[in-house]
Image: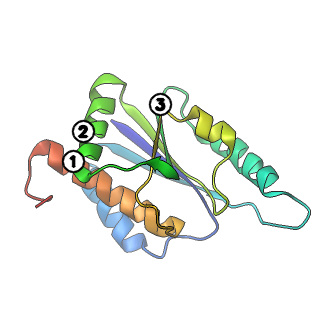
Amino acid sequence: MKIKIITISKTKSAYSDLENEFLKRLQKYAKIEVLNIKEEPITKNRSHDDIKAIEGEKLVSKIDQDAFIVVLDDKGKQFTSQEFAKQIEQIRDFKGAKINFIIGGPLGLSGEILGRANLVISFSHMTFTHQMIRLLLLEQLYRAFEILKGTGYHK
């Protein structure tokens, strides 16, 4: 299975040691690629919709056309860890071996990106930094694979 995580971000992760730990753990389950796209500056001369459209174009250029697209958005569906594992299993077994996860910038995602999504998920109604949500996604992916394998990690 191949998993690509594409994020809009202006800084490197403050959690890089933990991210690297989960990336290392995930290697036995999937090939993982993390792409960071530079966040567009918010200026008076451009509307928020214009900025999201520009970031959307950058995201589109990085999406694998044959991948199952999962967008993280605060209006998305929320899952328990077991439900998320089941989603990963169904995508892996029935919808192909590639998943692209998209994490937008501080203004959110363009309508084009949301429209391309096969699944829109939310980790919480609360707001998190992009670095934090990337770490949470990596941990939940690892947890999902461990649930599917039947290990004790989830307990």
Query: Do the residues under discs 2 and 1 have CB atoms within 8 angstroms?
Result: yes
Q: Residue lying farthest top?
A: 94
Q: Earlier in the sequence, mark 2 or mark 3?
A: 3
Mark 1 vs mark 3: in front:
1
Asked if residue 128 shows in the view, the reply is: yes
> Which colour assignment does the render follow?
rainbow
x and y, in percent, of residue 105 in the image? 63, 59
x and y, in percent, of residue 2 in the image? 38, 38
Indicate the secondary structure of the residue bearing disc 1: helix
Q: Earlier in the sequence, mark 1 or mark 3?
A: 3
Q: CA distance from mark 2 to mark 3?
A: 18 Å
**Which amino acid type is shown beneath numbered disc 3?**
Ala
Residue bearing the label numbered 3 = 67
In percent of the image, x 64 and y 67: which residue is there?
A: 10
**Which amino acid type is shown beneath numbered disc 1?**
Gln
Which of the pair 29/110 is nearer the observer? 110
Residue bearing the label numbered 1 = 82
x and y, in percent, of residue 130 in the image? 53, 65
Which of the labelled discs sits on residue 86, or is there none? 2
Looking at the picture, does residue 129 appear above or below residue 96? below
Horizontal side, residue 35 vs residue 125: left or right: right
Quadrant of the image for the N terminus?
Answer: top left
Horizontal side, residue 14 vs residue 46: left or right: left
Which of the pair 92/12 is nearer the observer? 92
Q: CA distance from mark 1 to mark 3?
A: 22 Å
In percent of the image, x 75 and y 46: which residue is there?
A: 53
**Which amino acid type is shown beneath numbered disc 2?**
Lys
In percent of the image, x 67 and y 60: which residue is there?
A: 107
Mark 2: few, some, or many residues within 10 Å (few <14, many ≥20)?
A: some
x and y, in percent, of residue 136 in the image? 37, 62
